[in-house]
Image: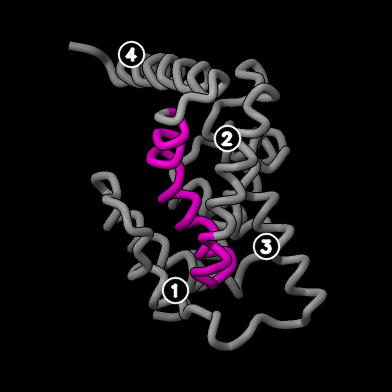
Amino acid sequence: MLSEIELTQRQSEAAESADAALVERLRERSAESCAELYDRYGPGIHRFAVTRLGDIQAAEDVVVETMVGAVRDIRRFNPRRSSLSAWVYGIARRRVLLEIRRRKRRKSAPAEAQVSADEIGEVSDGRDLAEGSARRLDAQRTVAELRDALSELEFEVLVLSCVEELSAREVGQAIRRSERAVHSILHRAKTKARERLVGDE
């Protein structure tokens, strides 16, 4: 029987192998590889973008822009510098931050484009989500309620780590911070989150 460490190692190696095969197909411009990229990352990026932006249409735009950007720039991906998931989420994060900057310039988004925290878990991206999506969406609703208590970076790290389940290393690669910095930010965010939840109770 495999130990937990050995099992994690094998899962990591299998993921790296699957990523390498997908990257190779993307570089060959295979149509099936584009669909696989979307199936693998589209739902998670959609959840991440909706949580950050509170706007379904803007989140859908982020997904499309992220997929187009990933396919267009796939030759720039370096597996020695980051995992494929961290690289794709890094593209999505930059798209989200760009939209946030646009909104700040416009001062506010139209009221009809807003989505309440309670509705985030009900958002459908039109595809079958992987097993465990209900648990993730429940976690996402909770995280969305904490938005006001956390800084933008703390909130972002909490979502990437606890909702999208990226490792601290992958989060660091996505936000361009060290793994140690991610642990520190995540610890601070969780502490604030616990204080907020206890206060709400």
Image quadrant assignment for residue 136 = bottom left
The disc label shown at residue 152, or none: 3
Measured in 3D between alpha carbons, the distance from the residue under mark 2 to the one under mark 4, in whole angstroms, is 23 Å
Residue 102 image position (x, y, % from top left): 76, 68
Residue type, label 2: Ala
Chain-order first, disc 3 or disc 1: 3
Left or right: residue 71 versus residue 119 is right
Which residue carries the number 4 mark?
6
Chain-order first, disc 2 or disc 4: 4
Q: Residue at x 53, y 52 (%)?
A: 63
Chain-order first, disc 4 or disc 3: 4
Residue type, label 3: Glu
* Residue 51 position (above or below residue 24): below
Magenta-highlighted residues: 33-60
Residue 51 highlighted magenta (yes or no): yes
The answer to whether the residue labelled 3 contacts the one labelled 1, judged by CB atoms less than 8 Å apart, is no
- Pick the front one: 196 or 68: 68
Residue type, label 1: Val
At numbered mark 2, what does the secondary structure look like: helix, strand or loop?
helix
Residue 47 image position (x, y, % from top left): 45, 57
Residue 171 image position (x, y, % from top left): 59, 40
Measured in 3D between alpha carbons, the distance from the residue under mark 3 to the one under mark 2, in whole angstroms, is 19 Å
Q: Residues within 10 Å of mark 3 (few under 14, many from 20)?
A: few
Which residue carries the number 1 mark?
198
Which residue carries the number 2 mark?
86
Labels in figure, total: 4
Q: What is the magenta segment's predominant secondary structure?
A: helix
